[in-house]
Every structure is written in C-alpha cells, then in structure tokens.
Image (cartoon, grey):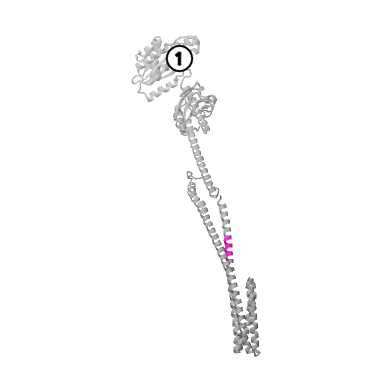
Amino acid sequence: MRISVITNWAYGVTVVLTVLSGSAFILSATSATRERIAVEEHLALDDLADGLALGAEERTDEARLYVMRDDIRHLDAFQGKEGEERRRERAIRGVRDLGATPIELQALEDVEKNADVLDKIEEEAIAAYRNGDQAGARQTLFGPEHDRLQTALLAAVTRFRDLANARTQSVMHDTQARSDWWGLIAKTLLAVTAALFLSVLYFILKRRVAMPLMRMTGIVTRLAKQDYAVDVPLDRRRDEIGEMNEAIHIFRENGLERDRLDAERRRDQQTKDLILQMMHRLQACQAQEELAEVVTLFAPQIFPDLAGNLYIMNESRSTLSRISSWHEPQRSDQVFPATACWGLRRGRPHVSSHEHGDISCQHLDQSDTMGLCVPLTAQGDVVGLLYFEERPQGHMEAEASRLYLELIAENIGLAAANLQLRDKLTNLSIRDALTGLYNRRSLDEDMNQHARDRELEQLSCMMVDIDHFKRFNDEFGHDAGDEVMRYVAQTILDTIGDAGRAYRFGGEEFTVLLPDTGDAEGFDIAERLRSNIRGLALSHRGRILGPISVSIGVGSLAEGAAVSTLLTRADDALLEAKAQGRNRSVMASVLVPDSKMRGSA
C-alpha cells in the first residue's frame, strides 16, 4: 500500500478518534455539569428545607416572645419573618421547576399547608393578644395544637428533605458515573489516538521511510560517483519508496548501459584508430613481407578474440598461399586452390559454421569452430584472402564488425595489389621480359655496387653464348628461338641456384655473376651449366629443334684488378671458347696475351 494512502487513512482515523475522544470529553464535561447542577439543586433544596424549618421555629419564637414580653420588636421581627416566609413559599413553588418528583411535590404541599395553618394560628394569637386576650394568645401559642402543627411541619420538612436528598443523591451518582464513563472513553480514545500516531510514526517514518532512505543514501552516493557496480536490490513495494527504488534501479541500469555504450564507443574509436594506423602502414609497405608483418601486428589488436591467416593469390590466380598468421588458427590449410573457398567463388564474405546453416569452405576442416573468409579485391580482381576463426573462450565479433572487416580487407587488397603492381613494374625495369632474367641495366648496377661496397671480395663472371642461335630462327622461326633462350635462361637459374645472379646481356648472350667464387669453382659451375644445357633436346610445335650447346667464358677478379675489367676478361674467354670450336668453357686466367687471342679469333 502506498505511503500516501496509509498516511491518509491514519490521518482520517486519527481525526475520527480525536473527534470521538473530544465528544467523549464534552459528554464527560456535560455529565460533570449536570452533576454540579444536581449538587447545587441538592444544596438548594437542603437549604430550602432548613430554611423552612428554621423560619417556622424563629417565627413561632418571635410570636411567643411578643405575647410574653409585649415587646414591639418581637412583633416587628415576627412580621419580618412573615415576609421571609412568603419568599420561601415562592421558592417552594419554584421547586416544581427544578424537576421535583410528585412525591416531593406532595411533601412540599404538606409543608405549605402546615405552614399556612401554623401561620394562621400564630396570626390569630397575635391579634387576640393585641385585642387584650393575653391568656388566650398564650394558650394558643403554647397549646398542644400549636405544638402538633409545628411538629407536623417539621416532619413534613424532614420528609421533603429526605426525598430531595434521595433524588439528588441518585442524580449525582448517575451523573458522576456517566461523567466517569465518558471520561474513561475519552482517555481510552486519546490513548488509542496516541498509539496510532506513534505506530504511524514508527511504521511509516522509520520502517517504510527512514530505514529504506538510509539504505538508499549509500547507493545514491555511490551512483552519484558513477560507481554503477553497486548492487541495487529491487523493492517490489507499491509505494513512493518502491517507486524511488525502481527509479534508482532504472538510473543504475541506464548508467550501466551508458558505461557499456561509452566502452563500446571507446573500443570502436580504438578500433578505428588501429585501422587508421594499419592503413597508413599498409600504404608505406614496399614488400609483401612488410605487408604480412603489418597485418600480423594489427589484426590481433583490432580483433583480439579472432585468430586468422592472410593468403595471397599466385600469378596464375589458381592457388592461395599463407604469408602471415596470428593466434594460431587451426581449421584452414596453409596452401589451397582458389576454388576451395566459397568466399572467393562468391566474391563476398562467407561464414563457415553449422550454426549458420551454410556450406563450409573446402579448405577448412570439419570442426564446429566458426570461420569467416573475406576476399581481398582490388580493381575488381581477387588478390588474396583474409581468414578469421573464433579462438577458444573467444567471442565471434566478425558479424558485428563486418564493416570493419570489409574496410580492412579492401585496404589490404589495395596494398597487396599495389605491391604486386610495383613488383611487376620493378621487374619490367630490371628484368628481361622474354627470359625473366635480370637485364643489362641491372648488371651494370650490380657491378657498380660491388665496386663501391665489396671491392675486396672475390667475384667470378660467366659470359654464356648460345651456339649457332641464328639457325633456330632461320629454320624454325623466331618463336622457336625465343623458346631456346627461355630454356637456356631457366637452365642457368636451375644450375647456379643461390650461388649467383643471371642476366641477359643482349641477343643470345647471358651473363652470370658469382660472388665469393674463385677461378676453379667458377669454372666447375660453367662446365656443369654447359653439360645441363647440352643434355636435353627441345621440340617446338611437334618439331625437334636439335641439340643446343653454349660457349662459356669464365673470368674472375685478379688481385688488384678493377671490377670494370671483369666483363672484358670473361668476354675475352668467351671469344676464345668460340675460337676453339664452341660448346666449351674457357677460363680467362689461362689465356694468351690479348693481342694474340684477338688475332686467333
């Protein structure tokens, strides 16, 4: 019940009890007034009775003294007593207005009759005395008849007094009992009113107001300090305190929701900042390894509950290879064909999970962990794939952060495409378009770098020329000649491996630089290369091109020689190899002086 209702009821009951107790006090006071009136009436009747008896005796005494002493003063006193007697007679007649009972009235009538008879006898005796009949007057006033009448009068007064006393005593007792009864009721109602007031004070002010307010004071203080972790017990009371408690509970829930939204906003802002930093670094990447490092660094910070891989598409657009990973994802393969991913097939993000009721990608295992594939596209072409999966005890944020994922994927795709385009442009500037080997420009730069930075280190050089190359162009066409050059270039790369770098010097000539390689080792590599090329016959469009052979000149830096002379020495050795009949390797260190070598060639 609401406090206002309880208060109103308590107020109403208090008013009613107050009115009743006041009425009881009024009735008690009225009864007391009636008791006082009854007492006054009793006293008045008693005084009246005493006055009648005393007046009758004094009048009789004055009459007797007058006839005995013949003193006019007694006659005057008798006549004065007579006037007083008349006034008492009128008072007797007023007794009827005081609510006298018929018996009392009858007793008063007897008193009045006896008083009239006695007054008449005494007046006659006075008259007889004044007429000279002194003996008769004395006989009348002192005779038995006068004594009998006086005795009867006194008896009537006594009887009246007894009747009046009995009645007034009964009235006084009744009024006193009624006054005491109403006083008791008034006191009881007053006590009930006080008890009700104290109960209301205790129940409402203390139990339902003060105590809940004391409990809520600490809660409100902590909420004012934005400590929304405080526990607010929900009070189901349907009153003002309950409404206040519900309001505080709603305020706390709103505060928690506001904190949650603020935390989400801060996390969102932090995510945006990380994405922005990631974008800036992606734009500054100059190699695919740097791109992989940037993604590996920022992806776990942006999505801490997700593990993932970054895949890049090969040049043939058929296979994806993992170049970076974070948080150790378990489901996806390291290398897989492009057709194994539904995300790549559809060109949009794809969720692989039994809970989503969609088909899983073929490059994922059959576990229940949710996986998300986001294609990396640039200018409409797919360049790679971002893969995410839920970590143990993690929460899959991918659906909620789809916009961020697509934004990141778009930027990674653009960065990867830019790097691939840069690599292509770089390759076009430093590599030969036909063979894929480094071009003459790259050779000059590497020679200059070696002369500048590693002049004291050993360096060997091979000059390789395809024997009778013009024959392939003339007999089989230029396409066949191109095929021969590509074959020789690939064989050079396979033979030297990581030992050096191969260049297309021009036409059908190739150059190989072998750092940290001496004369004997360089000559061995040249012989191995010549043997590898000679060991296979090519065919082109169903026609056998015939055996292919090369002539190789090998040169190395002599002690104190300049790097710029190395190519000349190797070229001289190549000329010597051709002069000796081709299909052979010649070491520049065993050549005759240049003038003779040139002459023999």
Magenta span dominant secondary structure? helix
Nearer the observer, 89 or 592: 89
Residues shaded magenta: 20-29
Image quadrant containing the C terminus: top left
Front residue of 225/48: it is: 48
Q: Give coordinates of residue 599: x percent, y percent.
A: 39, 11
Q: x%, y% of residue 1?
A: 56, 50
- In the picture provided, is 351 more to the left or to the right than 574? right
Q: Can residue 571 be seen at all in this image of the molecule?
A: yes
Please determine whether, in this image, residue 48 is positioned above or below residue 594. below
Tell me if residue 37 can be seen: no
As displayed, is residue 123 above or below residue 318? below
Amino acid on which disc 1 is placed: Tyr
Graded by Cα atoms within 10 Å as few (under 14), some (14 to 19) or many (20 or more), the crowding at tag 1 reads some
Q: x, y percentage for residue 279?
A: 49, 32
Q: Which residue is mark 1?
A: 487
Kindly give the residue lying farthest to the left in the view shown.
559
Q: Is residue 414 magenta?
A: no
Q: Nearest the camera: 507 or 62?
A: 62
Residue under the image location 64 percent in, 86 percent down: 125
Seen in the picture, residue 350 relative to 266 is either above or below; the reply is above
Circle 1 sits in a helix, a strand or a loop, which is it? helix
Looking at the image, residue 370 sits to the left or right of residue 101; the answer is left
Q: Position of residue 89 (x, y in %)?
A: 64, 78
Question: Is residue 510 positioned above or below 241 on the image?
Answer: above
- For this orientation, the residue located farthest to the bottom is 132
